[in-house]
Amino acid sequence: MQTSFTPEQLESPRIAEANTILRKCVHCGFCTATCPTYVLLGDELDSPRGRIYLMKNMLESGGPATAETVKHLDRCLSCLSCMTTCPSGVHYMHLVDEARAHVEETYTRPLFERLLRNVLAYTMPRPGLFRLSLIGAKLASPLAPLARAAGATRIAALLNLVPKQMPTPERFGQPGTYPAAGERKARVALLMGCVQSVLDPGINAATIRLLTRLGFEVVVSGEEACCGSLTHHMGKEHDALARARRSVDQWIKAEVDAVIVTASGCGTTIKDYGHMLRLDPGYAEKAKTISAKAKDITEFLVMQDLPEAQGGLTLAYHSACSMQHGQKIRTEPQRLLRRAGFTVMEVPEGHLCCGSAGTYNILQPEIATRLKERKVANIESLAPQAIATGNIGCMTQIGSGTRIPILHTVELLDWAYGGPRPEKLNALSPSPIRRMGEGGRQAG
């Protein structure tokens, strides 16, 4: 693709990088076939290729973003399926991140939208405040139909995502150091996280139980809370980079061998810290070090000598976009689950997003709902006993559309290797799974 940035513009490292990315695009259109919004809407401007044109024109002009450009950029899920498909290696993620920062700096959104985005950006990364807001939203959740009837679809979408029951806080997962059982193999940090630590604290608890049984000392600093992913994808770069720096500081200080992440959306961002902070002389090298140490929990576990288990449930495995497209982790979770004794089925149209995408299911509820319904229909066509996935956003989104239990992959692995049976499976009959410690050798 030809570009026409001025020499003055190209003196900016950010614009110079955008120029390099844009020039790699050859207009082939392979990305349109796997883009969820193009598949649904059929509008060229709602495809990666169309958005690349819009971003090119916006960045070349250097002026404020237009309402038309913002509309189509806001509809992008950042699922990154286009990057998996692209034969030319266009780094769409870095390009759209730069474009969103430009939009945030130059475009004045309508008042209600501005307020909603600011409330989400302020509340969700702060676990204590997020928990309080969920309690308030639960009290207001019966008003969701009225909100929808009044045209307040975003408020209705937000209220519909509130859990029917507030999860009980877990002791495991709170800040502290969790010693290894037996001889220590290594010391790892676990991202406590923001939304996940409130919506489903059992995920971190299962991770700590499993890792400590396998011989790993686990550190949860608690000081980093949000990794910055939520605000990063909203174009709020100042907030996102501040959170990235805080996380880097905590994990460098903890002197860990690996940083374990159980939310794949967070993992994609943390692995990109080296790029996000590349222009910060005080953090560039430290950020690269942390990015290199970041591992999704399944990526880390697949390197361990886990034994086989026998029996188990029949699962549909939903591969989160941030897992398969963002981190390029495509087979490891399924391999782990099968080795642990589960029957794993691949979901049809598995490359298409479920519509969660951070705050997307609140900010773009119509598209998100259509994607959720399509995803749920594909999952239910398999008639699984349960659904496994590796991202809290997907768990919340898909779980709001089906009665099939949905669990994090690590909850199932913890159960298979000696942990408690997840409460989410209480509605199912007892599984014939033979866990470690029940006739098999202990893991680790």
Image: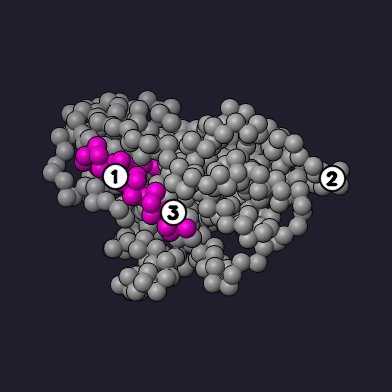
Whether residue 352 is visible here, answered yes or no, is yes
The image shows residue 188 at horizontal and vertical percentages of: 49, 40
Which badge, 1 or 2, comes first in the chain's sequence? 2
Residue in the picture at 65% in, 31% down: 26
Residue 25 is drawn in which quadrant? top right
The image shows residue 152 at horizontal and vertical percentages of: 43, 70
Q: CA distance from mark 3 to mark 1?
A: 16 Å
- Front position in the image: 35 or 323: 35
Residue in the picture at 38% in, 33% down: 333
Give the residue type that dot 2 points to: Thr
Mark 3 highlights which residue?
367
Q: Residues within 10 Å of mark 2 (few under 14, many from 20)?
A: few
Residue in the picture at 66% in, 54% down: 101
Q: CA distance from mark 1 to mark 2?
A: 49 Å
Which badge, 3 or 1, comes first in the chain's sequence? 3
Whether residue 257 is visible here, answered yes or no, is no
Mark 2 highlights which residue?
6
Helix, strand or loop status at disc 2: loop
Magenta residue span: 364-393
Residue in the picture at 62% in, 57% down: 68
Q: How is the image coloured?
A: one colour
Helix, strand or loop status at disc 1: helix
